[in-house]
Image (cartoon, rainbow, N blue to C red):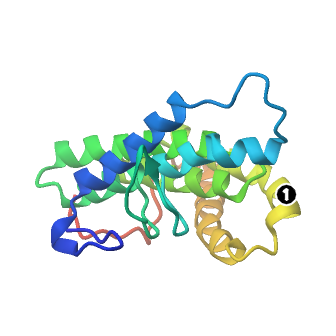
């Protein structure tokens, strides 16, 4: 159903994609850096936490995943979180859909935690986690603090990544969250709603009808 490089769409399922990601996470955990290693921070992050972060959320660039044997190069797939989001949209009932959205939120939050807080992927994955919470109709007391957390870390992220090839896309997706935050904090101050109220952006769309 889903494209993996070297295989047709009909040969690959969401479960297979998720299995690849879980195997990569397991292999990384089973092979920690040597205790006496003197790697610099960038080297350590690239080969351990960032690998797990990609697997929890997505593989952004073509890379070979090695799990004792070489398996396929994966192109721009949001792996565990992505699989959960797709399953949520394809679910046949509300209960199953909500279960998958909850799992997606957890996976993307976990993925973000694998990155430094000044890394652009940290903000990006948290934003997708917020989207999952929006689909869950989570209360503002859940989503607004997450948006604030991203906004407060954005200056540090921009200091490093402002001119990266991903910066424009990141800015666009984060702007949706910041507009949401501004609008609903205003409504709270006006007394129209409370932090226990559920809300999501008006421009959120889905093929799945809730």
Q: Where residue 190 sits: x, y (%)?
A: 62, 50
- Considering depth in this image, is 95 or 109 the residue closer to the camera? 109
The local crowd at label 1, few if under 14, some if 14 to 19, many if 20 or more residues have their Cα within 10 Å, is few
- Placement of 30 over or under 147, stated as above or below: above
Q: Is residue 127 left or right of residue 15?
A: right
Q: Please give the name of the residue rendered at 60% of the width and 45% of the height, measured from the top-left corner.
A: 112
Q: Label 1 belongs to which residue?
A: 155
Q: Please give the name of the residue rendered at 36% of the width and 53% of the height, measured from the top-left corner.
A: 135
Q: Where residue 85 sits: x, y (%)?
A: 34, 55
Q: Where residue 104 sits: x, y (%)?
A: 39, 46
| Helix, strand or loop under label 1 | helix
- Placement of 60 over or under 137, stated as above or below: below
- Considering depth in this image, is 190 or 39 the residue closer to the camera? 39
Q: Give the quadrant of residue 111.
A: top right
Q: Quadrant of the N terminus?
A: bottom left
Q: How many numbered circles does the render carry?
A: 1
- Placement of 42 over or under 141, stated as above or below: below
Q: Please give the name of the residue rendered at 79% of the width and 23% of the height, measured from the top-left corner.
A: 36
- Considering depth in this image, is 179 or 82 the residue closer to the camera? 82
Q: Is residue 93 left or right of residue 141?
A: left
Whether residue 194 can be seen here = no
Q: Please give the name of the residue rendered at 38% of the width and 41% of the height, measured from the top-left corner.
A: 22
Residue reaching furthest to the front: 69
Q: Quadrant of the C terminus?
A: bottom left
Q: Is residue 73 left or right of residue 2?
A: right
């Amino acid at each position: 159903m889903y494209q993996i490089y070297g295989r047709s769409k009909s040969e690959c399922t969401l479960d297979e994609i998720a299995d690849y990601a879980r195997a990569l996470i397991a292999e990384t955990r089973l092979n920690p850096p040597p205790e006496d290693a003197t790697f610099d921070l960038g080297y350590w992050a690239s080969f351990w936490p960032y690998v797990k972060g990609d697997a929890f959320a997505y593989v952004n660039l073509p890379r070979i995943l090695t799990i004792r044997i070489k398996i396929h190069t994966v192109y721009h797939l949001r792996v565990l979180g992505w699989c959960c989001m797709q399953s949520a949209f394809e679910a046949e009932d509300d209960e199953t859909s909500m279960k998958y959205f909850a799992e997606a939120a957890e996976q993307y939050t976990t993925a973000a935690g694998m990155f430094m807080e000044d890394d652009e992927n940290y903000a990006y994955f948290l934003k997708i986690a917020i989207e999952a919470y929006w689909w869950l109709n989570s209360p503002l007391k859940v989503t607004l603090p997450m948006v604030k957390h991203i906004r407060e870390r954005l200056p540090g992220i921009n200091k490093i990544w402002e001119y990266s090839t991903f910066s424009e896309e990141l800015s666009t997706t984060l702007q949706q969250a910041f507009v949401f935050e501004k609008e609903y904090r205003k409504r709270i101050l006006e007394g129209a709603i409370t932090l226990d109220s559920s809300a999501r952006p008006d421009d959120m769309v889905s093929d799945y009808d809730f």
